[in-house]
Image (cartoon, helix red, strand yellow):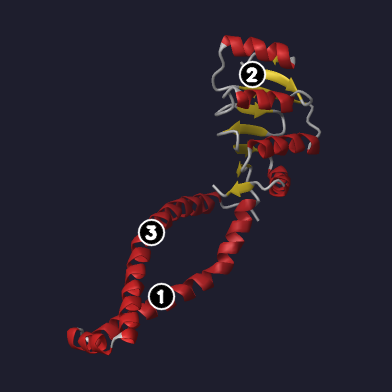
Amino acid sequence: MPVDKLKLSQALRQLDKELLNSKKLLEARKDLENSLHVVFAQIDFIEKQSDQDAVFTQYFKELSNSRELIAKFKELERSITELNKILQELEPARVRADLFFENFRDYRNYYFQESAKAFEFIRQAFETYNLERAFFKPQFLGMNNLNSMIDQFSLTKEKNQSLRVSKEKLPDLLNYLQANGLLRKSRLDNETIKILFNTPNELFIEAENSKIRRLDQIAKQLGGEPWDS
């Protein structure tokens, strides 16, 4: 069956539009959350006072229109129940959509509590995919640091302003870069995996979908948290 490119294009445009619209509506839920917290906090206060003081209970009856409050609360309760029902009905579709999109993921953010764990994650990734070298491209590097690194870690300058480093030298190089504050916003790339250091603990990874799934497992074993962004 041939692909209907027009319908696909229209579907993608509508999806993109409604994802933004849904995001805006969900952001507004904070106002609802705050309001509900106030509602139940005030009811809890009134209930506790009533349990402790019969005079307070009588005063509450005199001061309030309890019938109106009951009606308003029941209306709120019905709306909450209906919202929960809708969310439950949507859950299978949400799960399917999530699984579908994950088939196309070619990037991931990973956060590690310690930079040592992030470095171990990189080492294991290199071992897993038999990577023998990488190309380090710093965000900023002074000439003194550059010459020192080249000599100390046997680096090779590349035409694209990156530095080629062997797998064996990589762990020591990463420790050196962290100690000298040179990792943030730097890149470590090879033909298989591209790594951006947002911080020494936070990595942005680009790789094929199948490799991302394997990297998720490695990160999990090291206590890393994949961010779904």
* 44 sits to left or right of 116: left
Q: Which residue is mark 3?
A: 25
Label 2 crowd bin: few (<14), some (14–19), many (20+), radius 10 Å: some
Q: What residue lies at 43% left-to-right and 73% top-to-bottom?
A: 83
Q: CA distance from mark 2 to mark 3?
A: 44 Å
Question: Considering depth in this image, is 89 or 44 the residue closer to the camera?
Answer: 44
Label 1 crowd bin: few (<14), some (14–19), many (20+), radius 10 Å: few
Q: What residue lies at 62% left-to-right and 17% top-to-bottom?
A: 160
On screen, residue 212 above or below 74: above
Q: Residue 225, percent across and down? A: 62, 48
The amino acid on which the numbered mark 1 sits, given as a three-letter code, is Ile
Give residue 21's quadrant in the image.
bottom left
- Indicate which disc residue 162 carries: 2
The amino acid on which the numbered mark 3 sits, given as a three-letter code, is Leu
Q: What residue lies at 20% left-to-right and 84% top-to-bottom?
A: 64
Q: Which residue is mark 1?
A: 80
